[in-house]
Image (cartoon, helix red, strand yellow):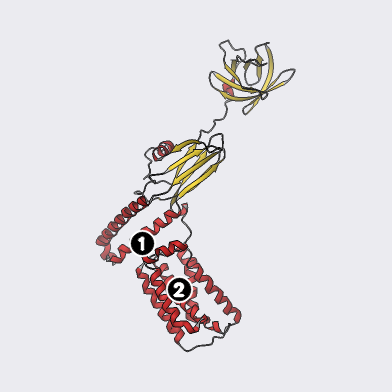
Amino acid sequence: MIKKINRLAHPVFLVSLFILLLNDLILKTTFHNYLTGKLSDFAGLLAFPFFWSVLFPKRIKEIHIAVVLFFCFWKSPFSETFVNLFGFYRIVDFSDYIALVSVFISFLLLKKEFVLYKVQPVFLKFIFLLSCFSFVATTQPPEPETYEDGFLYLYLTNESDKKIIALVNFKFSENEIALFKKQQIKIRLDQYEKFVSEEGKEHGLVYKSSDSLRIVNEVNEEWLLRQKTHVIDSIVLDKGAEKYLVLPLHGNDTLIGFPKNFKISILDANRKVLKSYDKKAFFNTIGNKGLNEFSRRDMFKLTFGKKKEPLKISDCYGKWESREKNDLNKIEINSQFCINDSNDEVYDCNYKNDTILVHSPNKIYLGIIKKVTNDLLIISWDSKPDLIYVKSKKPTVLAR
């Protein structure tokens, strides 16, 4: 086998393999332009048929013809169903056919007299494995775009006192996709034609029919990415939790709004619907004046529930009365003392957050302050049912 793959040490093959790997692993990610796209085609169409022809030297002609036919099919719209079925990635661009010249070069190199290169067997095995890796790596789809690449995102925050489930539907219908595509293509064609007519001479540009095809392909590729980023998700948010979703919208998509069927439903732990937001309700709730589905900012943020304000202990000070029976159903309190108005005894008291401790000679009363307003105070003493107090009209004794 080592002798058979000796021709993989051919300098032209090694250069094409190096360019293929360098381009796919570094240059495409860094520059991602017209040149990097063409480099992969030229290098790959030389390395790929050359590699398989070395392994099957009796089928050189058949391999090269098959590569030409498959590349023509691969780069045509007829391969759309095949690409989507197997989850492959490619861009339809008929100008890529110029790279077929590399197949012809590969064929000529193999037809020349066989040269036995003096290469260590270990190095040949390494070339073999590296070739296999490069052919797999170059067919992989790029990583989906993230927020940093330009997609917007939606923050969901739960400031209620219980766990909730957010059901988010952000999926474009087929009719919406077709309409938005048509709008984008028309605008981009008009903009490019205008640019060529005004700046074409200066930049040496002439409008060609292939430019229209390129723009159409670019829009189609964008929408393939958007469809992969469609959001139909169920998100669990614990009390006080915050999570975000990437939305298939770019910062410059000023003509592309939210899907017609956009909806966010908030459910409790038993999946009972607490609240639903359509587009109108959503933009009314997020509270940004002038912000709508065609506006573009870094993010959208939806907060469910109202954040509980910290308890202000001083609001509890004063004289209070309750109709319920309790040792402390009639009291007056301030920052240090509690007067039991039922027997006029004065006790020490202290607070910690929403907890009040009253120190009587016989016991310590532990109260949880549930609510306080100007005229209402609710305390649960010693884990018993809530005691509802109203502000007393009697004059106070303790200074505030």
Q: Secondary structure at mark 1?
A: helix
- Name the spot of residue 302 as percent of width and height, x first: 47, 40
Q: Residue at x 34, y 52 (%)?
A: 180
The C terminus - image quarter: top right
Type of the residue with mark 1: Asn
Q: Residues within 10 Å of mark 1 (few under 14, many from 20)?
A: some
**Nearer to us in this view, 110 or 119:** 110
> Can you say whether 393 is above or below 223 in the image?
above
From what the image shows, is residue 58 above or below residue 395? below
Which amino acid lies under the numbered mark 2 shown in the image of this protein? Gly
Residue drawn at x 34%, y 63% is: 214
Residue 240, labelled with which disc?
none
Residue 212: % across, % down:
30, 62
Q: CA distance from mark 1 to mark 2?
A: 22 Å
Callout 1–callout 2 Cβ contact below 8 Å: no
Q: Quadrant of the N terminus?
A: bottom right
Q: Is residue 32 visible?
A: no
Tell me which label, 1 or 2, sits earlier in the chain: 2
Q: Which percent across, then down, holds residue 182?
A: 31, 54
Q: Observer-nearest residue: 214 or 320?
A: 214
Q: Which residue is mark 1?
A: 217
Outermost residue, bottom side: 113
User: Residue 198, located in which quarter of the rendered image?
Assistant: bottom left
Measuring from the top left, give residue 46's x and y in whole percent.
44, 77
Residue that mark 2 sits on? 44
Choose between 275 and 156: the one closer to the eye: 275
